[in-house]
Image (cartoon, helix red, strand yellow):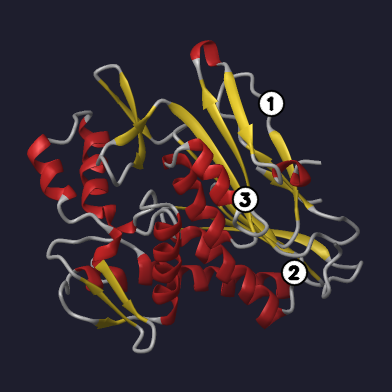
Amino acid sequence: MFTSATRGAYAPRSDSRFEFESKHMGTTFRIVLYAESKDRAEAAAKAAFARVAQLDGIMSDYKPDSELMKLCGASGRAIPVSAELFEVLQNAEELSKRSDGAFDITVGPVVQLWRHARRTQQLPEKDELAAAMKVVGWKNVRLDGKARTATLLLPGMRLDLGGIAKGYAADEALKLLREKFRIASALVAAAGDITCGDAPPDKDAWDVDIAPIAKGQTPRRLKLANAAVSTSGDLEQFVEIGGVRYSHIVNPKTGLGLVGRQSVTVIAKRGVTADSYTKAVMLMPREKALRLIEDTPGAATLIAVVGENETVRTTASPRFETFAK
């Protein structure tokens, strides 16, 4: 949830607020922008949503003809890829290195098993899980920057960009609004992934609320401008089997969905960073996760864990409070 709240370089006082929604990447993308006319706002939003749709066609693991799935079907060969896909793969590789493999886009075969588990309410078969884990490992993706190619080294590998693509798409939509339509006061939200440009006219920031993870918890309000925020958790996407609650977020080192209830919010300069870092922070040991955030310029995090009787224990990185004033 968010509400409008430095005056943009291209946003005069007479600009009005417009909102638009469109479904992409398995969720609803929402654009809030300030423009001088309805016609200009509608044209800008239409172009931004078209950009998101284009990126969905590149990075979807649900569409068999996507560029990503074509890459997954060509293991062992260096495949030329688009600039967009290569950039996302580079960002994923960098985070895999920094997080010691806690973030790993090669977890796709395991994610497929857990999607089935949520539908059937049954745990993945041990032999199927073991077979899937044999092709998981971020070091088995080879990138060549000069040729702009990607090689999947093992047969059966399947990449899953669900933990990074929406943040990147929000960045690109915001970039298009600024560069093509000179609209700088805008916000792009893809469910829990939100990227903010210049704040609305006469305000110093966008007001962005972090959704509570437990009953009775008060939402945390953030003040953001030219920054992004992402929240990941198991509030809605989980399966309970045998009295154990398994998150949709899978640990690439064990092949198991995370257990327990927790939520991670990451603030960063870009959506692609905030989106992906939430998963890394959730999967890493607490101290290492906080160190990762502190070592990332402009980043901050809030980690919330739900205990008995809906009690919530939170841990915030030192920079977090600068965004929560």
Q: What residue type is labelled 2?
A: Lys
Image side of residue 130 versus residue 207, left or right: left
Classed neighbour count for the residue bearing mark 3: other residues with Cα under 10 Å, few (<14), some (14–19), many (≥20) = some
Q: In which quarter of the image is residue 121?
A: top left
* SS type, badge 1: loop
- Mark 3 — residue? 294
Task: Name the residue rendered at 17%, 79% in the picture.
Answer: 77
Q: Position of residue 222 (x, y in %)?
A: 73, 44
| Residue 38 disc label | 2
Q: Distance between the residues labelled 3 and 1?
A: 26 Å
Disc 2 crowd rating (10 Å Cα; few below 14, some 14-19, many 20+) is some
Residue 112 spot, x, y in % from top left? 23, 48
Q: Which residue is drawn at 58% across and 66% down?
A: 171
Q: Which amino acid lies under the numbered mark 3 shown in the image of this protein?
A: Glu
Dot 3 falls on a residue whose secondary structure is helix
View extreme (bottom): residue: 147
